[in-house]
Amino acid sequence: MRIRYFLLSLPILAGLIVIAQEGPIQPGSSTVSKPRKKDPAATTEPESDLPKIPSKLAPKNKSPEEAEASFKVDTNIVNVDVAVLDDKGHFIPGIPKGAFRVLEDNVPQQISNFAMSEAPETVCLLVEFSNKFQSFYGSGWFQTLQAVYGFVETLKKDDYVSVIAYDMRPEILSDFSTDRRKTYEALQRLRIAGFSEANLFDALADAEERMKDIEGRKAIVLVSSGIDTFSKLTFDKTRKILQNDAVPIYAIGLLQTARELADARGGMGPIARMDFLQADNQMKTFAKETGGMAFFPRFYGEFPSIYQTISQSLRNQYSIAYNPSNTARDGKYRKIKVELVNPATNEPLPVKDQKGKPIKYQIIAKAGYTAPRTVE
């Protein structure tokens, strides 16, 4: 079944139909390569047959000609990955560059590079697994296993995945690999939890540190209650770390039905109720500010659509780059907002389905970045 969308009131899109297909898209290549990490120190120098001068014998002063030839490039390009999803979580392709508007601190920016691409994923599956909510054969235990096994089954052969479980501290159960045998062996270890603590903030910061230098499409899929017991990091410090690195976080909240039943039966006090509401808000904040999404399923039947939405959002994206008009290197946080507009009228761009009915769409992108700071 195909769903057709019409982008209206856009001259450059007259008669254009963009088609969003349901279900995962088959990868276009069978070549598998390891996730590459950024290496800012890597340089390529031309080989020379001339002997190298020892550093002690090298001339210390440069000639005027050499001094004039020396230059330094100081640029600050901001990259923003954007996913546009319909009200059913399907990616909407075919939107041209002119329909996107990027605001930085409410100031429109000039887009320098734009492309739509599909690529394999590199995912860190971060799973809460403690005796607090995942005691053996409890409802939280079953729901956690349902969530992680179901998500792994939706991955494609070229996707890299790592499994990290956390209670008092995070433990790497399997490193990044396309070998699903290693992944399932790691999931088999999720049987009996060791501690009753769940230090979410520390585990998230640790996963973010492992992910930030990996190139390509990457994300942290967090399966958690959202409760943090006694992490060394506070919520604000964790939030700042996640904002700086901007690895998208897709959070799946656990125990939604169990919480509602306990609350209806009077088995949940006001403190516990407030703790869970705060946990949900924390997960929503982490997801929104990193360009991810948060889900809070009440039924097992909701999981497949959640997996599809994550895959559609992460695998298919519009890659946008711009040189910020604010060139100050002050180390301050700058807010980013991405909109779809009609360039002729500068009004929001409406989208309708094949029956002419308007649909709601959402734009998934990171909420901002921290500008570099000049060190004097």
Image (cartoon, rainbow, N blue to C red):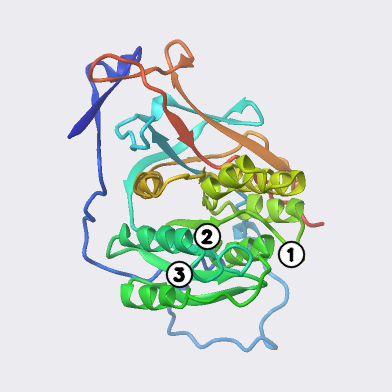
Q: Residues within 10 Å of mark 1 (few under 14, many from 20)?
A: some
Of the numbered discs 1 and 2, the one sitting upstream in the chain is 2
User: Measured along the vertical axis of the image, is residue 82 above or below residue 17?
Assistant: below
Residue linked to disc 2: 140
On screen, residue 207 above or below 310: below
Residue at the far left: name it: 1
Q: Residue furthest right?
A: 376
Q: Amino acid at mark 1?
A: Ser
Looking at the picture, which amino acid does disc 3 mark?
A: Ser
Instruction: Name the residue rendered at 73%, 62% in the picture.
Output: 229
Does residue 41 appear in this view? no
Residue contact between numbered discs 3 and 1, judged by CB atoms under 8 Å: no
Q: Secondary structure at mark 2?
A: helix
Calculate the distance from the C-alpha at mark 3 to the C-alpha at mark 1: 22 Å
Q: Position of residue 176 (x, y in %)?
A: 43, 72
| Percent of width and height locating residue 94 | 29, 32
The quadrant the C terminus occupies is bottom right
Q: Please, what is the three-letter code of the amino acid marked with disc 2?
A: Gly
Q: Which residue is mark 1?
A: 231
Q: Left or right: where does residue 56 sit relative to residue 48?
A: right
Nearest to N terminus: mark 3 or mark 2: 2
Name the residue tied to disc 3. Answer: 162
Rate crowding at label 3 as few (under 14), some (14 to 19) or many (20 or more) other CA atoms within 10 Å: many
State which quarter of the image contains the N terminus. top left
Is label 1 in a helix, a strand or a loop? Answer: loop
Secondary element type, mark 3: strand
Number of the front mark, 3 or 1 = 1
